[in-house]
Image (cartoon, rainbow, N blue to C red):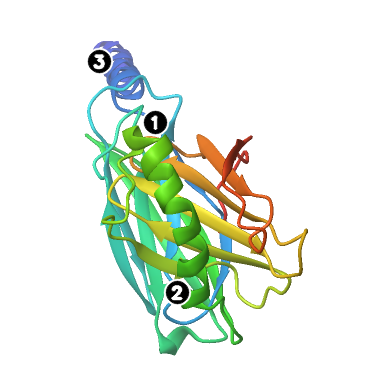
Amino acid sequence: MLRVKLFVVTVILLIGSFSACSKDEAFSLEVVPGTMEALVGRRCVFLAWPEEDEGGEEIEIRASAEGAEVLLEYSPINGNKVAEVTVIPDSSSLKDTVVVTIQGERGSYRDTVQVLIAVVDGFATDEQSAIEVRDRFIPWLAENHPELGIDEQASWTGTSGRPNILVVSHYLFFFKDWEMGLSWHVTIAPYDWARIYLRHRGTQITPSQAFEISSLSAQEDPHPITPPDSVTR
């Protein structure tokens, strides 16, 4: 009888301990996108955040991948923070799939997500062309939206968008505070539009602002448009 009582007490204590862990430490790690396609050397940027987290103790983010370099920014995170996991496939992963393991840890609780990068052969958007289109927006942003801190002195890190895409070109630029997604229609006026979105790094998972030049060749000024509901990868 004593053994039975001890067993019951032990089970109750374990349940109580698990409940406390679930309440104070548990979280669900979300990562976007789930899959990407990339060339060797392309910066593949994944966003990681805790879903429906109350913003308690911070969550440490770790990531690993074979056949690629892995960089972490904006970790640790909590309920209102977003980490960036940048994966750069190397030549050993060409025509293979890179499996990226991303783990969040808070106290004794861990949650792990795996995402995939298909490393393909092909062509990328020309960087110099992307810079020239980007720079059509910069002076206007500096004058009309100085609160963004984006001007001609801003230092950007760029990477091509999804490879082997024709007609509409895509490129990503990263500044200390902002991700800029750039796309432009490679055609003649009046259909040669260009668009950018802005996502605040470290705090947002979707763009908060977007702007368009309706025709590049017509030398039109940018104007605000509705931001897309997801980032471009």
Secondary element at image label 3:
helix
- Cα–Cα gap, marks 3 and 2: 59 Å
Identify the mark nearer the N-term, 1 or 2.
1
Residue 74 or residue 117, whichever sits in front? 74
Residue at the image point whose x is 30% and y is 27% from the top: 25
**3 and 2 marks in contact (CB < 8 Å):** no
Residue 153 or residue 174, whichever sits in front? 153
* Tag 1: amino acid: Phe
- Cα–Cα gap, marks 1 and 2: 31 Å
Quarter placement of the C terminus? bottom right
Secondary element at image label 1:
loop
Residue picked out by circle 1: 27
Identify the mark nearer the N-term, 3 or 2.
3
**1 and 2 marks in contact (CB < 8 Å):** no
| Tally of marks | 3
Of circles 3 and 1, the one toward us is: 1
**3 and 1 marks in contact (CB < 8 Å):** no
The percent position of residue 211, horizontal first and vertical second, equals 57, 43
Residue 42 or residue 195, whichever sits in front? 195
* Tag 2: amino acid: Arg
* Above or below: residue 161 compared with residue 181: below
* Tag 3: amino acid: Leu
Query: Which disc number belongs to residue 6?
Result: 3
Secondary element at image label 2:
loop
The percent position of residue 140, horizontal first and vertical second, equals 45, 46
Query: Which disc number belongs to residue 42?
Result: 2
For residue 230, side relative to residue 30 (left or right): right
